[in-house]
């Protein structure tokens, strides 16, 4: 038998232990939930391994269970499972470091929560799932005896939860794990059967495996008739129940168990599909997005079960990437138990499931749409959801009901249908402008004619909008039209009053073209400007300037795109330039001014100019001249 070895806890573990013991004093009872959850995970893992190695489960699958034993005399509470167990290395790794999920998530969530509140709010910490170490909330000594499935060797882990733990060889009849808590003197309430019953019902009722309590059977006179195991939990997988038999608290508790998130979900969706394929599911949307939401390899997907047997986490075959913020479970009746990712990828069953999961998720978001939480939802996940418009146009109709944009006519966000409702009769298109920020768009020159007509413009400031809007085309039979498009025509926009002015400035525009040949593809008269002298518009299919900049940052080879300079013939500046040109077509000052006009068109739309120094110098010269003229008069 292995000799006893003393190990030191990893520094972070000591930190967690310290926090747990000192902060959770008001909510100690959660230890039971954590230990039952670990035992149930161990059963799931064994069942999963047995799919490929059936010899690991001897006898009936139904024998997998969690047992609780109270020893009042010894003052101990023991949780036993006949699950996967742990090897010696796993014991050190799982119960001595923070390499495993639960504790690490705890630490990072704690750090995050601390940033938001200030200091160690014990109430706050109480809401986390703190895992195995919560045993030390009620015990001053914990012993774990375990035998890994398929192995003959057993080991015992012992610790007082301070700095070290001991591991030694041990004996255990079957595979699985016993966790024995030597209860602290003031925690003897957990030796009471009623207390344990209540806790299991409260926290662990949905655990699939039976959770049993060892109780003494008594005859009518109170004499002992031996021991028996009494099942405490109902054990119906929550998602298999009827929705009206499940309380909101139960959903919230299950969500916590599933995600380790300490905040309740924004919304849930519970469904059962019957027909050619049978499956049930339960979906949630967390209040806070995960940190990796926009990382290229962000994990996503739901937990997949087949006939209540856990198969895999993060199953992205049944949940598209643009719903990667959705959490939950899907349980299929039709997939084989040994299903792998490869099989899922081209299985008709998983395609059907995926399609339904998408529908259910959109219905769930639709429920949220009517609530006050929608703004929270949208700011957290809107940009992700919009990816769906681009990648899965077949769900466009539902998605279009859910999208929100900023707009020139409302303060916050608007839906497309509200926009359409506000449209004046003579407006027949939905106008939008793509740009880096609301402020820049709103004050930019492109929207002038639309504004004058009283037409509302959607302000799209998300980089994804360029792609998602590209696949939109129309909504409720109204075309979506970019305010920056070269062929924007605003119906009945006040035509240039003096049509003679166009001819006069035609020559000036030629001069503009000559001077700006390097920068623009065309110079032409504008129909969209009312108060600005010029603006730059995109040729058909062009990129908005801020996106072009973004893309050029990633790929310098990208050829610069030349845009069209539109000139407002009625603007006094253009009129004066035209006169100047008539006086002396070769005037050097004209070159300077035209370049200044171009730079100013860039600035007005929020684009950087090529040479700020040259621009500043020209401005200075102009202002000096103007100021001198003022002094003289
Ligand atoms: P989490 O459950 O979130 O991973 P815990 O702190 O609750 O974190 O548990 C740490 C690890 O210890 C688990 O991931 C698991 O590998 C192992 N473990 C705990 N309890 C058991 C058990 N009863 N049987 C097998 N392994 C266990
Ligand atoms: Mg755990």
Image (spheres, rainbow, N blue to C red):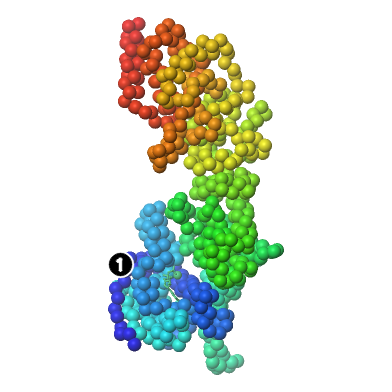
Mark 1 — residue? 11
Q: Which residue is drawn at 34% across and 27% down?
A: 611
Q: Residue at x 56, y 61 (%)?
A: 345
- Quarter of the image with the N terminus in it: bottom left
The image quadrant where one finds ligand 1 is bottom left
> Measured along the vertical axis of the image, is residue 151 above or below residue 299?
below
Residue 554 % position (x, y): 40, 42
Residue 64 % position (x, y): 54, 80
Residue 60 % position (x, y): 57, 83
For ligand 1, tell me if the residue under mark 1 lies within 8 Å.
no
The residue carrying pointer 1 sits among few (fewer than 14), some (14 to 19) or many (20 or more) residues within 10 Å by Cα, namely few
Q: Which residue is drawn at 44% across and 52% down?
A: 295
Q: Which residue is drawn at 30% across and 83% down?
A: 4
Quarter occupied by residue 242: bottom right
> Measured along the vertical axis of the image, is residue 87 above or below residue 492?
below
- Viewer-closest of 424 and 185: 424
Does residue 408 appear anywhere in the picture? no
- Viewer-closest of 558 and 244: 558
* Count of picture labels: 1
Outermost residue on the right side: it is: 275
- Viewer-closest of 14 and 625: 625
Does residue 97 appear anywhere in the picture? yes
- Quarter of the image with the C terminus in it: top left
């Amino acid at each position: 038998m292995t000799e006893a070895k003393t190990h030191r806890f990893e520094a972070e573990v000591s930190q967690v232990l310290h926090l747990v013991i000192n902060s959770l004093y008001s909510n100690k009872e959660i230890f039971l939930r954590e230990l039952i959850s670990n035992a149930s995970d161990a059963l799931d893992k064994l069942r999963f391994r047995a799919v490929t190695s059936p010899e690991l489960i001897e006898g009936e699958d139904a024998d997998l269970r969690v047992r609780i034993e109270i020893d009042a005399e010894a003052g101990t509470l023991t949780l036993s499972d006949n699950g996967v167990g742990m090897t010696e290395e796993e014991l050190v790794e799982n119960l001595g470091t923070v390499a495993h999920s639960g504790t690490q998530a705890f630490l990072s969530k704690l750090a995050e929560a601390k940033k938001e509140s200030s200091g160690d709010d014990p109430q706050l910490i109480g809401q986390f799932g703190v895992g195995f170490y919560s045993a030390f909330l009620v015990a001053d000594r914990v012993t774990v005896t375990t035998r890994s499935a398929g192995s003959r060797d057993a080991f015992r882990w012992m610790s007082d939860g301070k700095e070290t733990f001991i591991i030694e060889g041990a004996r255990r009849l079957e595979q699985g794990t016993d966790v024995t808590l030597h209860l602290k003197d003031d925690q003897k309430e957990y030796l009471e059967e009623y207390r344990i019953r209540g806790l299991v019902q409260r926290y662990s009722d949905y655990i699939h495996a039976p959770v049993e309590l060892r109780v003494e059977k008594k005859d009518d006179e109170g004499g002992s008739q031996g021991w028996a195991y009494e099942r405490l939990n109902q054990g119906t997988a929550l998602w298999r129940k009827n929705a009206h038999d499940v309380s909101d608290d139960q959903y919230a508790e299950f969500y916590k168990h599933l995600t380790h998130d300490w905040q309740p979900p924004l919304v849930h969706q519970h469904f059962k599909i019957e027909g050619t394929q049978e499956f049930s599911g339960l979906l949630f949307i967390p209040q806070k997005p995960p940190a990796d939401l926009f990382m290229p390899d962000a994990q996503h997907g739901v937990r997949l079960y087949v006939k209540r047997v856990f198969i895999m986490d993060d199953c992205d075959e049944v949940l598209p990437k643009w719903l990667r913020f959705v959490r939950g479970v899907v349980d299929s009746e039709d997939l084989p138990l040994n299903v792998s990712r490869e099989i899922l990828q081209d299985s008709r069953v998983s395609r059907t499931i995926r399609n339904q999961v998408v529908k259910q998720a959109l219905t769930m978001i639709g429920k949220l749409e009517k609530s006050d939480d929608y703004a929270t939802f949208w700011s957290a996940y809107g940009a992700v959801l919009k990816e769906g418009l681009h990648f899965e146009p077949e769900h466009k109709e539902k998605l279009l009901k859910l999208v929100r944009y900023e707009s020139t006519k409302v303060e916050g966000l608007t839906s497309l249908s509200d926009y359409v409702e506000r449209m004046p009769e003579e407006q027949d298109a939905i106008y939008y402008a793509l740009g880096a920020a609301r402020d820049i768009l709103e004050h930019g020159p492109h929207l002038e004619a639309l504004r004058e007509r009283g037409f509302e413009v959607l302000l799209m400031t998300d980089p994804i909008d360029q792609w998602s809007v590209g696949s939109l085309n129309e909504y409720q039979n109204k075309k979506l039209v970019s305010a920056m498009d070269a062929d924007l025509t605003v119906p009945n926009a006040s035509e240039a009053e003096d049509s003679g002015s166009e001819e006069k400035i035609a020559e000036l525009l030629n001069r503009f073209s000559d001077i700006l040949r390097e920068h623009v593809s065309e110079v032409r008269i504008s129909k969209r400007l009312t108060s600005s002298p010029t603006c730059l518009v995109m040729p058909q299919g062009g990129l908005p300037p801020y996106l072009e900049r973004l893309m050029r940052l990633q790929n310098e080879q990208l050829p610069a795109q030349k845009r069209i300079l539109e000139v407002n013939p009625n603007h006094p500046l253009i009129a004066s330039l035209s006169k100047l040109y008539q006086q002396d077509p070769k005037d050097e000052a004209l070159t300077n001014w035209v370049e200044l006009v171009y730079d100013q068109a860039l600035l007005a739309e929020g684009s950087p100019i090529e040479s700020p120094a040259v621009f500043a110098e020209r401005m200075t010269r102009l202002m000096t001249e103007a100021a001198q003229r003022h002094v003289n008069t």
